[in-house]
C-alpha cells in the first residue's frame, strides 16, 4: 500500500505573525518557518500505518518555494521514503494545490492521501476536500482515529458536537486533526540518512496545471487590538465588577 | 445574485449557525435555502419562517441522512446551476462539504468570512486571526463559509419561504456512516452561549476540572469550554476546545480559568465582549486581552467565586 502526504512550509506556530506596514501581507522575512503542524501529524500517521496496515511506501509532496525542500527533508527524516517538490515562487491557492495533487495521484496511484486539516497560515481548511472532489474519492476529514482493513478506511472524525465515524472505500482522502497522534522528532542519524533519500523537482507546468490565483488579496491589516483592562484585588471585587456589568445579581 | 444557503440542522430543528449564514447571504443577494436530510419536513417548515428567505429547496433522501460530503456535494453542485453563491456556516459539517463543492465547480472557496464588502469582496481572518485579509474573488460562482460570530443572527420568524422538493442525486457509494458519539449536555451550546467558563491545563485532572468549572458555569448559566492543553490531557472532551482549531466563540462574557492565553487559544475567543481571566501568573498573556483579571490560585478563587455569586 502506498500513501501520499502533502506537506506545507508555514510560519512556525510559536512565532507571532506581524502584519507588514504596507498592508500587503504578513512579514515572513527572517522568521522561523516549519512544517505545518497538522502535516507533521499526517506524516506520523503514514509512518504508523507502515506497522499497522502494511504501508510499503510513503511519498511526501510540497508545493511552494525552493526552500520547501527543507520541509520535505524533515518529512524524510521522520520516515517518509521519497519526496516530490513542485516549485512555485508565487503562492498557489488550495484549488491549484489540489489540481497538482490530483495529477500526482494519477501518476503515483496511492491508496491513501493523508493531508493536514488546515494550513495554519491561511487557515483555509479546503485542500483535502477539494482533492477528494476532483478525484471523486471518499473523504475522512478532521480525523482523530484511522483504521485500515479489508479495502476500507474507518475514520473517526472530530465534529462540533463530539465525534462521528465513517467507513470509506479505498482509495480515499484523510485529513488530520490534532489528536490523531503525537508526531515524532527526527533523530540525528535519520536526519543524516534523509539527505540521500530521493527528491524529484517539478513545476506546476510539468503537470499542465494553471495555478493563476482566483482570489486577489487587496489588503491585510491587523485586527482591532484589545487593550488590557484592570486587575482586581480579590474575589469580592470581581463579584462587584460582574454585578456592575449585569452578569450576575 | 441568487445565493443558496446550507441549512445546518440535526434532523429536527434548524441550528443557530444557519442564521448568521442567512444574514451574510442577504448582504450578497437573494436568499434561498437548502435543507438536505432524511425526514426533514419539520426542519424545512422551520427554515421557511426565517426572515428574508425565498425558496427552500428540500432534498429528502436516506443518502443525505448524515450529511456525508460525498453524497451532498453533487446535490449542491446540481442546484448551483441556478445560483450564484453557495453560502454555508463554518460548522464542521459545512466545512467538510463546501470545499468539495468548490472544487467540483472549479472555484476557489472563501473560508470563514467576517464581512461582505461587496458581492465579490470579503474579509477573512488568516494566521489564527492575527491578520485580517480583504480578498476579491474572480470566480463567476462563489463558495463561501461564514464565521458565525461575525454576523448577527437572522430572525427565526417573519419569513414566508416557499418549500420546493428537489430530486435526489443518490448515494455516491464512496462512504457510509458508521456511528456517532454526540455529547448530550443541559448546558448552552458553546457557539451560542452568552457566557462561557473555560478551563485550562492548570485544572490538572478531569475530576478537578468538573468539580471547579462546572459549578461556576452552573451559577452563571454558562457553557463550558477548554483549552487544547486541557482537552489533550483528557480533562475535557474535544468538543469543548476553543481556539484556532477548535470552536470560535464570542460570548458576552468569557471566563478563562488557568489558561495562559496562547495565540491559538486567543484566536477562538478574543472577540468576546468581556474577558475575565483568573491565573496565578501575573505575566500570563491572557491578561493582555482580559478586561478583568484576578491574579491568584484558582483552587482558592474559583470555589469562593462560585459561593459568592
Ligand atoms: C496547530 C496548533 C493548533 C492549536 N490550536 C489550539 C486551540 O484551538 N485551542 C487552544 O486552546 N490551544 C491550541 N493550541 C495549543 C496552544 O498553543 C497552547 O499550548 C494551549 O492553548 C495551552 O493551554 P493552557 O493555557 O491550558 O495551558 P498552559 O499554557 O500550560 O497554561 C496554564 C496556565 O495556568 C496557570 N496556572 C497554573 N496553575 C494555576 C493555579 N493553581 N491557579 C491559577 N492559574 C494557574 C499558569 O500560570 C498558566 O498560565 C494549538 C497548538 C497548535 C500547535
Ligand atoms: N502548498 C502546499 N503543498 C503541500 N501541501 C499543501 C499545500 N497547501 C496545502 N497543503 C495540504 O493541504 C492541507 C490543508 O491546507 P489548507 O486547505 O490550505 O488549509 C495542509 O495541511 C497540507 O497537507
Image (cartoon, grey):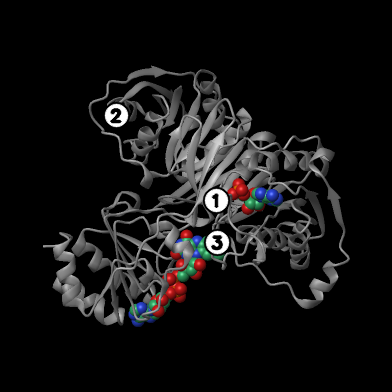
Q: Are marks 1 and 2 in contact (CB under 8 Å)?
A: no
Q: Residue furthest front?
A: A22
Q: Position of residue B219 (x, y in %)?
A: 19, 64
Q: Quadrant of the C terminus of chain A?
A: bottom left
Q: CA distance from mark 1 to mark 3?
A: 13 Å
Q: Are marks 1 and 3 in contact (CB under 8 Å)?
A: no
Examine the rendered structure and indicate whether residue B220 appears above or below residue B308. Answer: above
Q: Is residue A113 above or below residue B68?
A: below
Circle number at residue B213:
none
**Quarter-of-image position of residue B202:** bottom left
Q: Secondary structure at mark 2?
A: loop
Q: Which residue is mark 2?
A: B50
Q: Give the chain letter at badge 3.
A: A
Mark 2 Cβ and ligand 1 under 8 Å apart: no
Circle 1 or circle 3, nearest the eye: 1
Dot 3 falls on a residue whose secondary structure is: loop
Disc 3 marks which residue? A17
Q: Which residue is mark 1?
A: A23
Q: Is residue B199 left or right of residue B132?
A: left
Q: Is residue B245 visible?
A: no
Using the image, name the chain to which the residue with label 2 belongs: B
Image-quarter location of ligand 1: bottom left
Give the CA separation, mark 1 to mark 2.
39 Å
Q: What secondary structure is found at the residue carrying circle 1?
A: loop
Q: Nearer the viewer, residue B80 or A10?
A: A10
Amino acid at each position: 500500500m502506498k500513501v501520499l502526504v502533502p506537506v506545507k512550509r508555514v510560519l512556525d506556530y510559536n512565532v507571532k505573525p506581524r502584519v507588514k506596514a504596507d498592508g500587503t501581507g504578513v512579514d515572513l522575512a527572517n522568521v522561523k518557518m516549519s512544517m505545518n503542524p497538522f502535516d507533521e501529524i499526517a506524516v506520523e500517521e503514514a509512518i504508523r500505518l507502515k506497522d499497522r496496515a502494511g504501508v510499503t511506501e510513503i511519498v511526501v509532496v510540497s508545493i511552494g518555494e525552493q526552500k520547501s525542500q527543507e520541509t520535505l527533508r524533515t518529512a524524510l527524516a521522520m520516515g517518509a521514503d521519497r519526496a516530490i517538490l513542485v516549485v512555485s515562487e508565487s503562492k498557489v491557492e488550495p484549488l491549484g494545490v489540489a489540481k497538482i495533487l490530483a495529477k500526482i495521484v494519477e501518476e503515483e496511484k496511492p491508496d491513501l492521501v493523508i493531508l493536514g486539516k488546515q494550513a495554519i497560515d491561511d487557515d483555509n481548511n479546503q485542500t483535502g476536500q477539494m482533492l477528494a472532489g476532483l478525484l471523486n474519492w471518499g473523504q475522512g476529514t478532521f480525523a482523530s482515529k484511522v483504521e485500515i482493513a479489508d479495502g476500507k478506511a474507518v475514520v473517526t472524525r472530530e465534529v462540533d458536537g463530539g465525534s462521528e465515524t465513517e467507513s470509506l472505500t479505498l482509495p480515499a482522502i484523510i485529513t488530520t486533526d490534532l489528536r490523531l497522534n503525537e508526531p515524532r522528532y527526527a533523530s540525528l542519524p535519520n536526519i543524516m540518512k534523509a539527505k540521500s533519500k530521493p527528491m524529484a523537482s517539478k513545476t506546476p507546468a510539468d503537470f499542465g496545471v494553471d495555478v493563476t490565483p482566483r482570489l486577489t488579496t487587496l489588503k491585510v491589516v491587523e485586527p482591532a487590538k484589545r487593550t488590557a483592562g484592570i486587575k482586581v484585588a480579590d474575589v469580592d471585587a470581581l463579584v462587584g465588577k460582574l454585578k456592575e456589568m449585569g452578569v450576575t445579581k | 445574485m441568487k445565493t443558496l444557503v446550507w441549512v445546518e440542522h440535526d434532523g429536527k430543528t434548524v441550528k443557530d449557525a444557519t442564521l448568521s449564514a442567512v444574514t451574510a447571504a442577504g448582504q450578497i443577494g437573494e436568499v434561498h435555502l437548502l435543507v438536505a436530510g432524511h425526514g426533514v419536513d419539520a426542519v424545512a417548515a422551520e427554515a421557511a419562517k426565517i426572515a428574508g428567505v425565498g425558496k427552500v429547496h428540500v432534498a429528502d433522501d436516506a443518502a443525505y441522512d448524515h450529511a456525508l460530503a460525498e453524497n451532498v456535494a453533487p446535490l449542491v453542485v446540481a442546484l448551483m446551476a441556478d445560483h450564484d453563491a453557495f453560502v454555508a456556516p463554518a460548522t464542521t459539517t459545512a466545512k467538510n462539504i463546501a470545499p468539495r463543492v468548490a472544487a467540483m465547480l472549479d472555484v476557489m472557496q472563501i473560508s470563514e468570512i467576517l464581512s461582505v464588502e461587496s458581492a465579490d469582496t470579503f474579509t477573512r481572518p488568516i494566521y489564527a486571526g492575527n491578520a485580517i485579509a480583504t480578498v476579491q474573488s474572480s470566480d463567476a460562482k462563489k463558495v463561501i463559509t461564514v464565521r458565525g460570530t461575525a454576523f448577527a443572527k437572522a430572525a427565526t420568524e417573519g419569513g414566508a419561504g416557499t418549500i420546493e422538493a428537489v430530486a435526489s442525486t443518490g448515494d455516491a457509494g464512496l462512504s457510509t456512516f458508521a456511528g456517532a458519539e454526540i455529547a448530550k449536555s443541559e448546558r448552552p451550546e458553546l457557539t451560542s452561549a452568552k457566557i462561557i467558563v473555560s478551563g485550562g491545563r492548570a485544572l490538572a485532572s478531569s475530576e478537578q476540572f468538573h468539580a471547579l468549572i462546572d459549578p461556576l458555569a452552573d451559577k452563571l448559566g454558562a457553557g463550558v469550554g477548554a483549552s487544547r492543553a486541557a482537552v489533550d490531557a483528557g480533562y475535557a472532551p474535544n468538543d469543548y476546545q476553543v481556539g484556532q482549531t477548535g470552536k470560535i466563540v464570542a460570548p458576552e462574557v468569557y471566563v478563562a480559568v488557568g489558561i495562559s492565553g496562547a495565540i491559538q487559544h486567543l484566536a477562538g475567543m478574543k472577540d468576546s465582549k468581556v474577558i475575565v481571566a483568573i491565573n496565578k501568573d501575573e505575566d500570563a498573556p491572557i491578561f493582555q486581552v482580559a478586561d478583568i483579571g484576578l491574579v491568584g490560585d484558582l483552587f482558592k478563587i474559583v470555589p469562593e467565586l462560585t459561593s459568592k455569586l
